[in-house]
Image: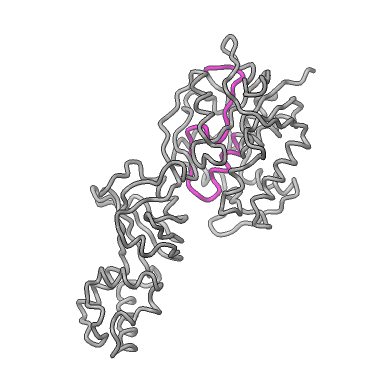
Amino acid sequence: MISKKVAVIGAGAAGLMAAGTAAQLGASVTLIEKNPRVGRKIMITGKGRCNILNNCDVPTFIQNVPVNGRFLYSAINNFTPDDAYEFFEGLGLPLKTERGNRSYPISDKAVDVVDTLRRFVLDSGVDIVNDTALSLELEDGAAVGVKCKKNTYFADSVIICCGGMSYPLTGSTGDGYRLAKQAGHTVVDLKPSLVPIESSDPECKSMQGLSLRNVALKIIDNQSKKTVYSDFGEMLFTHFGVSGPMILSASSHLRQLEEGRYAASIDLKPALDFEQLDKRLQRDFAENSNRDVSNAFSKLLPRKMIVPVLKRWGVPFDKKCHSVTREERRRLCDILKTFTIPLSGFRPIEEAIVTSGGVKTGEIDPKTMESKLVSGLYFAGEVIDVDAYTGGFNLQIAWSTGRLAGQSAAY
């Protein structure tokens, strides 16, 4: 039996999985990567620790893919989070699972994930070439190769795994969309997802660098007055607005983010209800009875939040604690339970973790990842119009679609 030739474009998470899988099944695989090193984007995921997957069951995984989750049923059942966990441990990369079922390498080093995958593809017999894909070679409605800057690589199957538009310094510059369009595919409008959010509130800049932990967040739609997203965990103030895990997750729920539409409401003391918080304030003010109110918050709030809270409260900074009225105290409770930040827009797509949008799922066979328009052409990873919340789900999409595309292309 003559082995099939497979060309894989892009050596990111999906491309490495697809190339190694196809080679293990006997295909002769060329992996085309324009960067001198593979896995550039994996290196920066999870703050350099690499949240490699979410150790959850299949229904939970699908729930965490708000855009075209159903399209992934075949891919995720073919290579589940359990399978991915076993796969990496089987390659000698021990994993651990933390809060929210997020799994990481025990070493906490993303470079170990990249090295493991590189070893996997090389041991499987993949030929990695440093070249830039310019166009697909198409004949009679079939993909027969890839024309690159240095060479043309002919193949029986071509898998596009070029990533999205986020983090262009890692090589995600939208090449896959251009190649897909050349093959006649529709590319759904690209938007940033899992991206920091800007605010017009100048206090964000004064709190720059402050990380809040164990706070509750709600994103309120000011038009409908409804809560569109709620979470508990960690967030960060920046010079432009807000960021951190909860904000990144929230961003994927906001489709039209214009000035005045949404606000973030932060409960700074979620462990205390309103009455418990009021009693806590009474105690703090009693302990600081003769001091200015501005000096009574050191135990209650992070230092960078004291002035912004006092400004919103509107009580003179030099007012003595013993003269704070019940009404003023209740108003302060309100501020601490619903500290509101207006949201004005997303940061640029270049700063997004994930690109929302991409090759239209209706034009791809979900059972094989093959194009319905061009035979022998496959897609995997972020180039497809699927994206998930933060927590390892997007990398699982790469592992599962890469695995399925590699298997399909090799047969």
Q: Which quarter of the figure is the C terminus placed in?
A: top right
Q: Position of residue 48 (x, y in %)?
A: 59, 53
Q: Position of residue 196 (x, y in %)?
A: 42, 50
Q: Is residue 400 magenta?
A: yes
Q: Position of residue 41 (x, y in %)?
A: 58, 43
Between 224 and 205, the one lying in front of the other is 205
Residue range of the region highlighted in magenta in the rendering: 373-401
Between 29 and 388, the one lying in front of the other is 29
Q: How is the image coloured?
A: one colour
Identity of the residue drawn at 75% across and 41% down: 119
Residue 232 in the figure: left or right of residue 95: left
**263 up-or-down from 349: above or below:** below
Residue 131 in the figure: left or right of residue 300: right
Q: Position of residue 306 (x, y in %)?
A: 34, 73
* Total number of numbered discs in the rendering: 0
Residue 400 in the figure: left or right of residue 5: left
Q: Which quarter of the figure is the N terminus placed in?
A: top right
Identity of the residue drawn at 30% across and 64% down: 338
**285 up-or-down from 301: above or below:** below
